[in-house]
Amino acid sequence: MTQEQVKVQPKSMEWKYRLIESLAPVLGFLFAMVVMMVTVQFIGESPIKALSAILTFSFSQAGIAYIVSQSIPLIIAGEANAIAFQAGVFNIGVEGQYLFGALCAGVAGAYLNLPTYIHIPVVILAGMLGGMIWILIPALLKIYKGVHEVISTIMMNQIASAVILYLVNGPFNGVRGVSQSFNLRTPYMEPTAVFPSLHNVINSVTGLFGFKFPHYVAVDLSWLIALIVVVVLWFLLFKTSLGLRIRWIGQNISASVYAGVDVKKTLLVTMLISGAIAGLVGLQEVAYISKFFTPNITRGLGFTGLAVALLARNNPLGVIASGLLFSFLSRAGYGLQMYTKVPNSLIGIISGLMILSVVVIDQILRRYARTLRRREVG
Amino acid sequence: MFDFWYFLLRGLQLSAPMAYGALGAVYSETGGVVNIAVEGMMLTGTFFFVWGATLFKSWIAGLLFAIVGAVLISLIHGLATITFKVNHVVSGTALNILASGLTRFLSMQVFGMETQSAVNPYTPPTFLRINVIAYFFIPLAIFTLWLLNRTRFGLRLRSCGQNPWAADSLGVNVYGYKYVGVILSGVFAGLAAATLYPYQWIDAMTAGRGFLALAAMIFGNYNPLYAVLAAMLFGYAETLTYFQSQIPLLSGISPILIKAFPYILALIVLAGFLGKTKPPKADGVIFEKGEG
């Protein structure tokens, strides 16, 4: 930061240093890809074949459509983590929050009888409310008791797993007589609560570029929700005083206390926002794809969201790119699995390695740019 | 019939993975390195145990493999956080993802199956029906307490977690001590892996126990003995679900709720009885020699 103010010479090479600093994501990605190809060669498969399998499987019409569609929950989960990280809060509980939020949404969709223009907002609000309820206890414990959010949100994740199983087994069981079975679920949602498809709207735009999303890929209201979340979070963080306070707390909590920030209130608001966004993660699956809630809902999105946020450096706009990247990687894994001898799991290794190499290279480049700056200043 | 002695021993065994994981995390965080990667280190350890044991037809080889596997992950964590000064949480999260992929990938290469290994007949011997390795976590917790608070090594490790700049100015090799803390957390994660379920590796078999170990460490206020006791709270609560039908008082309650009970209890305890937990002052802080 301080280096940026030292612009003594008029012909500064500052843009060059900025460029060097911004190369890390590209270099990290390339490094991970090289390691992947070497590994592919090592287990006796042709890297060229693997690469072409990834490219053809990912960048076909269906491939692109799936990547975009499946990035939606990842982006939302990424945003839930990003806003918390911005305030220096490590919300490892997005996992439990989205499970409980999804249950609330499923229940609101199945048990209420409302006209559709009210029912859908109610389902969305139920999801957000569920997420907020699930982060409320950790938030209060952190603020009033100083209990570290990592421990309390992990506890809440465990409790969520049990509670959703209990509730879907008991009061909200949609398949009577079946207990703890594989098909355990809530009743089907009312047609008035199911998310509308946005195929027509989206395709009329992408059609201009000759691209159509196939009907079997989920293009639904959750896309719009994700977009709104991204825009609102970006605006909140960078254009409002609340956002400024959130980022202050994240950067230097004791300085923000001296600056007169009400830390308790800001932390509470930030965590509730994070929980509310987390409550939206499961909505695509519950309110559009399956139309009921089940404890067998896709798990682990909260933890992937953690990685999505970190790779985007908790920038709400960056989360879009990082969510798409993780969605692409998961698609690439299936491509490899299908067309080559390379197991899907290699992508897991590569995802982890990519995050690591991006941050390590980032550190190295920053250091290098700093040395160059110092040399320039003399 | 409710077999109380077996309940006690079984609880010890089920507590062991969390207890060892928590002890390891205490070493790492005492040295100032936040270790979210315990889950990944434990998972890697479980695979390496089965791999080593079946390869050399000996559980001791399995144990050594488990420790080596977990230490390898911890070394990457050390390299990233200490040498390359990457954010500790980012590195830990990345390593958890990496470990999950790595174990499945290796299982495919070694056993030809991606989600489980072959059955491993070379498991640690049992004493009174439970894994012998599970008996050592309480003595090791006491040893750790002594080591951290009564020895020169402990003082220096703590100084790296409290104020690495001061430690550095007094000539302590801060990077070295931090590495030792992180590597020890790998060693303990290996022990945790050997007590989890040495008969077979199954995908994602740690099932969040590494995170519970972290929770136990914070719950125990970064004190090895309290951390182990917190781990035992989780372990015994899990045990209770297996013995529930034999206990008249509990047999009417849904087993699902019993499963959630220890976590609710932990929250209540944290809310009501404990004050603030105090992590080492420079826990998670990036230390750079010659700055600050």
Image (tube, rainbow, N blue to C red):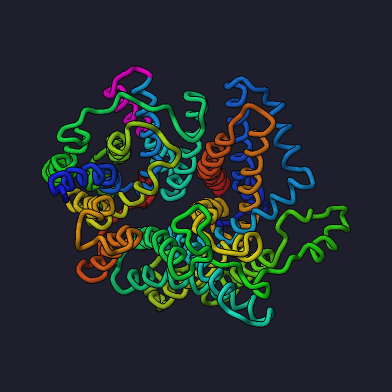
Q: Image quadrant of residue A341?
A: top right
Looking at the rendering, which quadrant does residue B21 occupy? top left
Residue B45's place in the image compared with A320, above or below, is: above
**At 21% across and 66% down in the image, what residue appears?**
B274
x and y percent of residue B45 in the render? 36, 34
Q: Nearer the viewer, residue A46 or A261?
A: A46
Q: Which residue sits at x=39%, y=46%?
A: B207
Decide whether the magenta segment is chiefly helix, strand or loop: helix
Q: Please give the count of numbered marks on the rendered protein.
A: 0
Above/below status of B61 relative to A247: above
* Image-based side of A231 in relation to B276, left or right: right
Residue B174 x %, y %: 29, 41
Q: Residue at x 32, y 70 (%)?
A: A141
**Is A57 contained in the magenta span?**
no
Q: Position of residue A366 (x, y in %)?
A: 54, 46
A202 on left or right of A28: right
Q: Can the viewer see residue B160?
A: no
Residue A97 as seen in the image, left or right of residue B7: right
In-front residue for pair A325/A94 = A94
**The magenta segment:** B55-71
- Hey, which residue is sitting farthest top in the picture? B56
What is the x, y in percent for residue A171? 45, 70
Image: A76 above or below A329 = below
